[in-house]
Image (tube, rainbow, N blue to C red):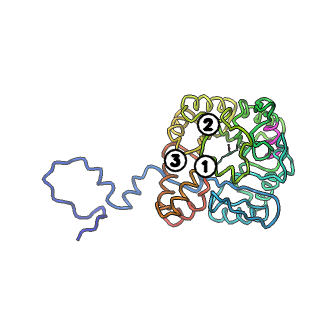
Amino acid sequence: RRSPERTINGPSEESSLKLRLRPRRLRRSEPIRALVRETQLSLDDLALPFFVCPGSGVRREVQSMPGVFNLSLDEFAREVASAREMGIRAILLFGLPETKDEVGSGAYDPDGIVQRAIREARKIASDLIIIADTCLCEYTSHGHCGVVRDGAVMNDETLELLARTAVSQAAAGADIVAPSAMMDGQVAAIREALDQSGFAETAIMSYAVKYASAFYGPFREAAASAPAFGDRRTYQMDPPNAREALREAELDYAEGADILMVKPATPYLDIVRAVRERFDVPVAAYHVSGEYAMLKAAAAKGWIDEERALLEILTGIRRAGADIIITYCAREAARLLARR
Ligand code: PBG
Protein backbone atom coordinates (compact mmCIF):
# COMPACT_ATOMS: atom_id res chain seq x y z
CA ARG A 1 0.00 0.00 0.00
CA ARG A 2 1.13 3.47 -0.81
CA SER A 3 1.43 5.74 2.18
CA PRO A 4 -0.45 9.02 1.89
CA GLU A 5 2.84 10.86 2.22
CA ARG A 6 5.01 9.83 -0.73
CA THR A 7 8.64 10.71 -1.13
CA ILE A 8 9.70 13.04 -3.89
CA ASN A 9 10.66 10.12 -6.10
CA GLY A 10 7.74 7.94 -5.15
CA PRO A 11 5.46 6.29 -7.68
CA SER A 12 3.16 8.55 -9.56
CA GLU A 13 -0.39 7.89 -10.38
CA GLU A 14 -1.50 6.77 -13.84
CA SER A 15 -3.89 9.34 -15.10
CA SER A 16 -5.88 10.02 -18.18
CA LEU A 17 -6.42 13.63 -17.10
CA LYS A 18 -4.29 16.22 -18.82
CA LEU A 19 -3.54 18.10 -15.63
CA ARG A 20 -0.26 19.92 -16.18
CA LEU A 21 -0.43 22.11 -13.12
CA ARG A 22 -0.47 20.18 -9.90
CA PRO A 23 0.25 22.22 -6.74
CA ARG A 24 0.21 18.96 -4.82
CA ARG A 25 3.64 18.12 -6.30
CA LEU A 26 5.20 20.43 -3.75
CA ARG A 27 3.29 18.96 -0.84
CA ARG A 28 4.29 15.34 -1.23
CA SER A 29 6.56 15.07 1.76
CA GLU A 30 7.73 17.02 4.75
CA PRO A 31 11.15 17.79 3.23
CA ILE A 32 9.61 19.21 0.08
CA ARG A 33 7.06 21.20 2.09
CA ALA A 34 9.94 22.56 4.14
CA LEU A 35 11.82 23.41 0.96
CA VAL A 36 9.07 25.67 -0.30
CA ARG A 37 7.87 27.01 3.04
CA GLU A 38 7.42 30.76 2.79
CA THR A 39 7.26 31.80 6.41
CA GLN A 40 9.61 30.75 9.16
CA LEU A 41 9.05 31.08 12.83
CA SER A 42 12.19 31.80 14.79
CA LEU A 43 12.86 32.31 18.46
CA ASP A 44 14.86 35.37 17.45
CA ASP A 45 11.60 37.12 16.66
CA LEU A 46 9.71 36.43 19.88
CA ALA A 47 9.50 38.49 23.05
CA LEU A 48 8.18 37.07 26.33
CA PRO A 49 6.29 39.35 28.75
CA PHE A 50 6.74 39.24 32.54
CA PHE A 51 4.75 40.70 35.43
CA VAL A 52 7.03 41.58 38.33
CA CYS A 53 5.74 42.28 41.82
CA PRO A 54 7.11 43.15 45.28
CA GLY A 55 8.08 40.59 47.90
CA SER A 56 10.12 37.45 47.71
CA GLY A 57 9.20 33.92 46.86
CA VAL A 58 6.04 35.18 45.16
CA ARG A 59 4.82 33.08 42.27
CA ARG A 60 1.12 33.83 41.87
CA GLU A 61 -0.58 32.36 38.85
CA VAL A 62 -2.93 34.66 36.96
CA GLN A 63 -6.28 32.93 37.05
CA SER A 64 -7.32 33.82 33.54
CA MET A 65 -3.83 33.12 32.15
CA PRO A 66 -2.73 29.65 33.21
CA GLY A 67 1.05 29.39 33.02
CA VAL A 68 1.55 33.15 33.53
CA PHE A 69 2.59 34.42 36.94
CA ASN A 70 3.11 37.52 39.02
CA LEU A 71 6.72 37.04 40.07
CA SER A 72 8.77 38.67 42.78
CA LEU A 73 12.27 39.65 41.70
CA ASP A 74 13.94 36.48 42.97
CA GLU A 75 11.47 34.25 41.11
CA PHE A 76 11.66 36.53 38.09
CA ALA A 77 15.44 36.15 38.01
CA ARG A 78 15.10 32.38 37.93
CA GLU A 79 12.53 32.54 35.15
CA VAL A 80 14.60 34.90 33.06
CA ALA A 81 17.61 32.62 33.34
CA SER A 82 15.58 29.62 32.22
CA ALA A 83 13.92 31.53 29.37
CA ARG A 84 17.34 32.67 28.17
CA GLU A 85 18.56 29.10 28.35
CA MET A 86 15.65 28.02 26.17
CA GLY A 87 16.78 30.50 23.54
CA ILE A 88 14.42 33.37 24.26
CA ARG A 89 16.29 36.57 23.56
CA ALA A 90 13.84 39.35 24.36
CA ILE A 91 11.61 40.04 27.34
CA LEU A 92 8.96 42.70 27.97
CA LEU A 93 8.43 43.97 31.50
CA PHE A 94 5.30 45.07 33.34
CA GLY A 95 5.26 46.01 37.01
CA LEU A 96 2.86 45.73 39.91
CA PRO A 97 3.98 48.43 42.34
CA GLU A 98 3.72 48.31 46.12
CA THR A 99 1.38 51.30 46.11
CA LYS A 100 -0.49 53.31 43.53
CA ASP A 101 -1.31 57.00 43.41
CA GLU A 102 -3.11 59.57 41.27
CA VAL A 103 -0.08 60.32 39.11
CA GLY A 104 1.43 56.86 38.84
CA SER A 105 4.71 57.81 40.47
CA GLY A 106 5.74 54.16 40.74
CA ALA A 107 6.20 54.18 36.97
CA TYR A 108 9.09 56.67 37.05
CA ASP A 109 10.57 55.86 40.44
CA PRO A 110 14.27 55.18 39.76
CA ASP A 111 13.93 52.36 42.26
CA GLY A 112 10.51 51.22 41.05
CA ILE A 113 9.63 47.60 40.53
CA VAL A 114 10.33 47.57 36.78
CA GLN A 115 13.54 49.56 37.14
CA ARG A 116 14.76 47.00 39.67
CA ALA A 117 13.65 44.14 37.44
CA ILE A 118 15.60 45.62 34.53
CA ARG A 119 18.77 45.72 36.62
CA GLU A 120 18.13 42.18 37.82
CA ALA A 121 17.58 40.84 34.31
CA ARG A 122 20.71 42.58 33.07
CA LYS A 123 22.79 40.79 35.69
CA ILE A 124 21.49 37.46 34.49
CA ALA A 125 22.13 37.83 30.80
CA SER A 126 24.08 40.74 29.41
CA ASP A 127 22.89 39.99 25.88
CA LEU A 128 19.20 39.79 26.78
CA ILE A 129 17.02 42.35 25.00
CA ILE A 130 15.11 44.10 27.75
CA ILE A 131 11.98 45.92 26.69
CA ALA A 132 10.06 48.00 29.23
CA ASP A 133 6.39 48.78 28.77
CA THR A 134 6.08 52.53 29.24
CA CYS A 135 2.67 53.36 30.67
CA LEU A 136 1.02 54.60 33.84
CA CYS A 137 -2.04 52.34 34.17
CA GLU A 138 -0.39 49.77 36.42
CA TYR A 139 0.71 52.59 38.75
CA THR A 140 -2.29 54.90 38.95
CA SER A 141 -4.96 54.49 41.62
CA HIS A 142 -7.67 55.05 38.98
CA GLY A 143 -6.11 52.60 36.50
CA HIS A 144 -6.03 54.99 33.55
CA CYS A 145 -2.96 55.41 31.35
CA GLY A 146 -2.56 59.10 32.15
CA VAL A 147 -3.29 61.95 34.52
CA VAL A 148 -7.01 62.29 35.24
CA ARG A 149 -8.77 65.63 35.80
CA ASP A 150 -12.53 65.88 36.20
CA GLY A 151 -12.87 62.37 34.88
CA ALA A 152 -10.85 63.02 31.72
CA VAL A 153 -7.43 61.65 30.82
CA MET A 154 -5.19 64.66 30.15
CA ASN A 155 -2.91 64.23 27.17
CA ASP A 156 -0.18 66.83 27.43
CA GLU A 157 0.32 66.57 31.17
CA THR A 158 0.73 62.83 30.78
CA LEU A 159 3.50 63.19 28.19
CA GLU A 160 5.92 64.54 30.72
CA LEU A 161 5.31 61.58 33.05
CA LEU A 162 5.68 59.07 30.22
CA ALA A 163 8.96 60.73 29.24
CA ARG A 164 10.21 60.50 32.82
CA THR A 165 9.18 56.85 32.94
CA ALA A 166 11.06 56.06 29.72
CA VAL A 167 14.20 57.86 30.92
CA SER A 168 14.16 55.98 34.23
CA GLN A 169 13.77 52.69 32.36
CA ALA A 170 16.63 53.55 30.02
CA ALA A 171 18.76 54.58 33.00
CA ALA A 172 18.09 51.21 34.60
CA GLY A 173 19.35 49.53 31.43
CA ALA A 174 16.37 48.90 29.17
CA ASP A 175 17.36 48.45 25.52
CA ILE A 176 13.93 49.37 24.24
CA VAL A 177 11.09 51.37 25.75
CA ALA A 178 7.58 50.60 24.59
CA PRO A 179 5.09 53.41 25.13
CA SER A 180 1.59 51.95 25.34
CA ALA A 181 -0.51 54.80 26.73
CA MET A 182 -1.84 55.96 23.34
CA MET A 183 -1.33 59.62 24.24
CA ASP A 184 -0.82 61.88 21.22
CA GLY A 185 2.80 62.93 20.86
CA GLN A 186 4.17 60.33 23.25
CA VAL A 187 6.87 59.06 20.92
CA ALA A 188 8.21 62.57 20.23
CA ALA A 189 8.16 63.45 23.93
CA ILE A 190 9.99 60.26 24.85
CA ARG A 191 12.54 60.54 22.03
CA GLU A 192 13.39 64.07 23.05
CA ALA A 193 13.71 63.20 26.73
CA LEU A 194 15.86 60.15 26.01
CA ASP A 195 18.17 62.12 23.74
CA GLN A 196 18.52 64.96 26.23
CA SER A 197 19.33 62.50 29.01
CA GLY A 198 22.10 60.74 27.10
CA PHE A 199 20.07 57.75 25.94
CA ALA A 200 20.22 58.30 22.20
CA GLU A 201 20.86 54.58 21.76
CA THR A 202 17.68 53.47 23.51
CA ALA A 203 15.14 52.38 20.92
CA ILE A 204 11.42 53.07 20.96
CA MET A 205 8.97 50.34 20.08
CA SER A 206 5.72 52.23 19.98
CA TYR A 207 2.35 50.66 20.51
CA ALA A 208 1.40 52.80 17.53
CA VAL A 209 -1.83 51.02 16.71
CA LYS A 210 -3.49 49.90 19.89
CA TYR A 211 -7.16 49.14 19.79
CA ALA A 212 -9.61 49.47 22.69
CA SER A 213 -9.92 45.71 22.82
CA ALA A 214 -11.88 43.17 24.84
CA PHE A 215 -8.83 40.94 24.53
CA TYR A 216 -6.91 42.82 27.24
CA GLY A 217 -9.22 41.49 29.95
CA PRO A 218 -6.90 38.86 31.42
CA PHE A 219 -3.96 41.28 31.34
CA ARG A 220 -5.84 43.64 33.60
CA GLU A 221 -6.13 40.84 36.11
CA ALA A 222 -2.43 40.04 35.68
CA ALA A 223 -1.35 43.66 36.09
CA ALA A 224 -4.17 44.81 38.36
CA SER A 225 -4.70 47.68 35.94
CA ALA A 226 -8.39 47.75 35.09
CA PRO A 227 -9.69 51.33 34.97
CA ALA A 228 -11.69 52.16 38.11
CA PHE A 229 -14.21 54.14 36.08
CA GLY A 230 -15.03 54.41 32.39
CA ASP A 231 -12.90 52.70 29.78
CA ARG A 232 -9.96 53.46 27.49
CA ARG A 233 -11.96 54.41 24.42
CA THR A 234 -10.96 58.07 24.53
CA TYR A 235 -7.35 57.11 23.91
CA GLN A 236 -7.19 53.59 22.46
CA MET A 237 -8.46 53.10 18.92
CA ASP A 238 -11.91 52.16 17.76
CA PRO A 239 -11.72 48.55 16.43
CA PRO A 240 -13.53 49.20 13.13
CA ASN A 241 -10.92 51.69 11.92
CA ALA A 242 -8.12 50.76 9.52
CA ARG A 243 -7.24 54.06 7.83
CA GLU A 244 -6.90 55.63 11.24
CA ALA A 245 -4.39 52.88 12.11
CA LEU A 246 -2.15 54.04 9.28
CA ARG A 247 -2.46 57.61 10.48
CA GLU A 248 -1.41 56.56 14.00
CA ALA A 249 1.50 54.59 12.56
CA GLU A 250 2.51 57.53 10.36
CA LEU A 251 2.61 59.88 13.34
CA ASP A 252 4.73 57.55 15.44
CA TYR A 253 7.03 56.89 12.49
CA ALA A 254 7.46 60.62 11.98
CA GLU A 255 8.04 61.15 15.70
CA GLY A 256 10.91 58.68 15.59
CA ALA A 257 9.55 55.26 16.52
CA ASP A 258 12.13 52.60 15.70
CA ILE A 259 9.60 49.77 15.71
CA LEU A 260 5.84 50.05 15.13
CA MET A 261 3.51 47.75 16.99
CA VAL A 262 -0.01 46.60 16.23
CA LYS A 263 -2.10 45.24 19.07
CA PRO A 264 -3.92 42.84 19.47
CA ALA A 265 -2.59 40.54 16.76
CA THR A 266 -5.00 37.94 15.38
CA PRO A 267 -8.15 40.06 15.08
CA TYR A 268 -6.03 42.76 13.35
CA LEU A 269 -3.87 40.87 10.86
CA ASP A 270 -5.09 43.15 8.08
CA ILE A 271 -3.62 46.06 10.01
CA VAL A 272 -0.32 44.23 10.53
CA ARG A 273 -0.14 43.69 6.77
CA ALA A 274 -1.05 47.30 5.97
CA VAL A 275 1.53 48.73 8.37
CA ARG A 276 4.16 46.32 7.03
CA GLU A 277 3.54 47.46 3.48
CA ARG A 278 3.50 51.17 4.22
CA PHE A 279 6.49 51.57 6.56
CA ASP A 280 10.04 50.36 6.29
CA VAL A 281 10.67 49.91 9.99
CA PRO A 282 10.27 46.61 11.82
CA VAL A 283 6.68 45.80 12.71
CA ALA A 284 5.75 44.07 15.95
CA ALA A 285 2.44 42.41 16.77
CA TYR A 286 1.25 41.71 20.29
CA HIS A 287 -0.48 38.35 20.74
CA VAL A 288 -2.33 39.61 23.80
CA SER A 289 -3.65 38.13 27.02
CA GLY A 290 -7.14 37.37 25.70
CA GLU A 291 -5.73 35.60 22.66
CA TYR A 292 -3.61 33.52 25.03
CA ALA A 293 -6.56 32.81 27.32
CA MET A 294 -8.74 31.59 24.46
CA LEU A 295 -6.10 29.16 23.29
CA LYS A 296 -5.45 27.86 26.81
CA ALA A 297 -9.15 27.49 27.60
CA ALA A 298 -9.95 25.58 24.44
CA ALA A 299 -6.89 23.38 24.96
CA ALA A 300 -7.84 22.68 28.59
CA LYS A 301 -11.24 21.50 27.40
CA GLY A 302 -9.56 19.24 24.87
CA TRP A 303 -11.26 21.13 22.07
CA ILE A 304 -8.14 22.12 20.20
CA ASP A 305 -4.65 20.75 19.62
CA GLU A 306 -2.77 23.41 21.53
CA GLU A 307 0.65 22.84 20.00
CA ARG A 308 -0.49 22.87 16.40
CA ALA A 309 -2.83 25.77 17.00
CA LEU A 310 -0.09 27.80 18.65
CA LEU A 311 2.35 27.31 15.78
CA GLU A 312 -0.40 28.12 13.31
CA ILE A 313 -1.32 31.33 15.13
CA LEU A 314 2.26 32.55 15.47
CA THR A 315 3.05 31.64 11.88
CA GLY A 316 -0.08 33.45 10.75
CA ILE A 317 1.01 36.59 12.55
CA ARG A 318 4.44 36.36 10.88
CA ARG A 319 2.84 35.69 7.49
CA ALA A 320 0.70 38.80 7.89
CA GLY A 321 3.95 40.75 8.07
CA ALA A 322 5.04 40.96 11.69
CA ASP A 323 8.79 40.89 12.18
CA ILE A 324 8.47 40.57 15.93
CA ILE A 325 5.80 38.82 17.99
CA ILE A 326 5.21 39.52 21.63
CA THR A 327 3.61 36.44 23.14
CA TYR A 328 3.02 34.75 26.47
CA CYS A 329 3.55 31.51 24.54
CA ALA A 330 7.22 32.17 23.76
CA ARG A 331 8.35 29.34 26.06
CA GLU A 332 5.98 26.82 24.48
CA ALA A 333 7.09 28.03 21.07
CA ALA A 334 10.72 27.53 22.09
CA ARG A 335 9.97 23.96 23.11
CA LEU A 336 8.13 23.21 19.89
CA LEU A 337 10.78 24.80 17.69
CA ALA A 338 13.54 22.89 19.43
CA ARG A 339 11.71 19.65 18.71
CA ARG A 340 11.36 20.21 14.97
C1 PBG B 1 -0.77 49.04 29.29
C2 PBG B 1 -0.88 47.80 28.50
C3 PBG B 1 -1.98 46.93 28.35
C4 PBG B 1 -1.53 45.84 27.60
C5 PBG B 1 -0.21 46.08 27.29
N1 PBG B 1 0.16 47.30 27.83
C6 PBG B 1 -3.34 46.98 28.93
C7 PBG B 1 -4.34 47.93 28.50
O1 PBG B 1 -4.13 48.77 27.65
O2 PBG B 1 -5.39 47.88 29.13
C8 PBG B 1 -2.33 44.64 27.23
C9 PBG B 1 -1.55 43.39 26.98
C10 PBG B 1 -2.34 42.14 26.96
O3 PBG B 1 -3.58 42.12 27.01
O4 PBG B 1 -1.69 41.09 26.92
N2 PBG B 1 -1.46 50.13 28.81
Amino acid type, residue under disc 3 in the picture:
Ile
**CA distance separating discs 1 and 2:** 13 Å
Residue on which disc 3 sits: 317
Task: Please name which of the two marks, 1 or 2, marks the residue nearer to the observer.
Answer: 1
Secondary structure type for disc 3: helix
- Which label sits on residue 209? 2
Residues shaded magenta: 161-170
Residue 162 is drawn in which quadrant?
top right
- Which label sits on residue 312? none
Q: Is residue 282 visible?
A: no
Amino acid type, residue under disc 1 in the picture:
Val
The quarter of the image that holds ligand 1 is top right
- Which label sits on residue 288? 1
**Label 2 environment density (alpha carbons within 10 Å; few <14, some 14–19, many ≥20):** many
Secondary structure type for disc 2: strand
Residue 199: image location, x then y, percent: 80, 41
